[in-house]
Amino acid sequence: MVIATVSLCIASLVLLITWLKLNPFLAFLLVSIVAGLAFGIPVERIINSVQKGLGDILGSLSIVICCGAMLGKLVAESGAAQKIASVLMGIAGRKYIRWALLLTGFIVGIPLFYAVGFVLVMPLVFTIAYRYDLPAVTIAIPVLAALSVAQGYLPPHPAPTALIVQLGAGIGKSLLYGVAIAVPAMIIGGPFFSRIVRIKSAVKPGIFEVRTLSEEKLPGACNAFLSALLPVILMLLSVFANWASKNSIFFHKAAVFLGEPSVVILLSLGVATITLGRSMKVKMTQLMNMYADATKEIAMVLLVMGGAGALKQVFVDSNVNRELADSLSTLSIHPLVLAWLISATIRVCLGSATIAGLTTAGIIGPLMARAHMDPNLVVLSIGSGSLMFSHVNDPAFWMFKEYLGLSFKDTVLSWSLMESIIALVGLAGVLTLNYFL
């Protein structure tokens, strides 16, 4: 009965978003209230549950996501991402062009939101396709595979960061595990898969353009790489410092504090404001306007996360999540595979990796604790499932189709298949790590 009720809630969420075209945030709120009534929460406490869930998730993530958006905007607008791409292209040449694109997508994808990274790299894809007379689709797949992997697996992106908070994982360890799984996933889904794709783009290079800067206006290569990758560098350093300082209470506490995601992203943004902003003669008012624009772009992302947190809290307050865990624990499916399946199912139904991940976290949390699973692996299992089979209900599907001028069939055979490969390799990587750890 519990599984049927929760399934009905998720199905209602799917219908509200896909059929009635309701905003996902409003859909989450509506389903949360109805779910509270269905699960027997006293009427006067339902709104309290919704408010608590929304507040908890936003309170823990607002700093990371907003500052991460500001950093991404600065990396894009300052020309740092353009510089990173040009340096890697110059090193690689034609023979290793797909590998250079893969690395470009991964580096650029760490600080940038997917849509921003997509628009940023597509002119590069068309330029290379024209220069080396290669099909644009086979050039696009490696760089977009890396962008997808960064979005689904690695903090400080919204969904992985939110999962880390909800499931009590460690951001440093999740990042290390995530990179270990991301590398084979994006290699198989990127350069390897692109070599067997036999689809040609109908769009000529140069049709889609974004603002590019002249070489003399770009930051230096070291500046661009260090500024863009500083969040990851600081996270990894915090893991090492945390381990090395265990014999000193003061330094251990300092390492823990400096390893907090909010502190990491604030420090990174502060440094980038100087290295990519003020040192490049950008006025402070211009920088602040840029940051304000960045927060406007991710406002709905924050609200959707808050809505997912509200639904999760309703599950918690009604004890449905525990009953659900009892029911699911009787299934002869490995908990990591189950987490992946739930996330993948919601992703296919809704098209949103973020919604799929956050909704799954609310369902799988209690089961994870009972099965004594490593929360870092659960985060990655859910994250990989949330990338499964992007199709017509995912805006990225249409971006890929329209930018490359593909038919519906060719988009499925290239983009959708690439995303599915990434998701399946991610699951295999999680199970492999679980076996050895």
Image (cartoon, grey):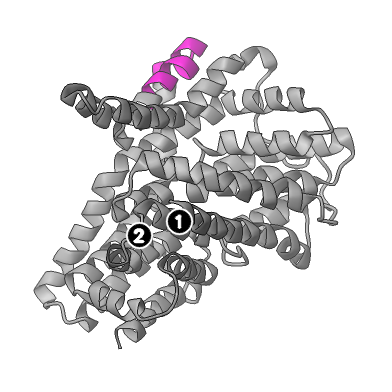
Task: Identify the residue at image location x=44%, y=57%.
Answer: 354
Do the CB atoms of the residues marked 2 and 1 lie less than 8 Å apart? yes
- For disc 1, the neighbor class at 10 Å (few under 14, some 14 to 19, many from 20) is some
Our reading of the magenta stretch's main secondary structure is helix
Q: Is 82 on the left-hand or right-hand side of 340?
A: right
User: Which numbered dot is residue 373?
Assistant: 2
Instruction: Say whether residue 119 is visible.
Output: yes
Going by the numbered disc 2, the residue's amino acid type is: Met
Instruction: Say whether residue 65 is visible.
Output: no
Q: Is residue 278 magenta?
A: yes
User: Which of the image's four quarters has the N terminus?
Assistant: bottom left
In this orientation, which residue lies closer to the viewer: 393 or 240?
240
Going by the numbered disc 1, the residue's amino acid type is: Asn
In this orientation, which residue lies closer to the viewer: 87 or 206?
87
What are the residue bounds of the magenta stretch?
269-284
- Per the image, the residue denoted by label 1 is 434
Residue 291: quarter of image: top left
Task: Identify the residue at image location x=86%, y=42%.
Answer: 134
Above or below, comparing residue 392 to residue 54 in the picture: below
User: Which numbered dot is residue 245?
Assistant: none
- For disc 2, the neighbor class at 10 Å (few under 14, some 14 to 19, many from 20) is some
Q: Where residue 355 appears, x then y in whole percent?
A: 42, 61
Q: Where residue 98 appears, x then y in whole percent?
A: 75, 39
Q: Residue furthest right?
A: 133
Q: Is 56 on the left-hand or right-hand side of 419?
A: left
Residue 23: quarter of image: bottom left
Task: Identify the residue at image location x=21%, y=64%.
Answer: 50
Dot 1: element: helix
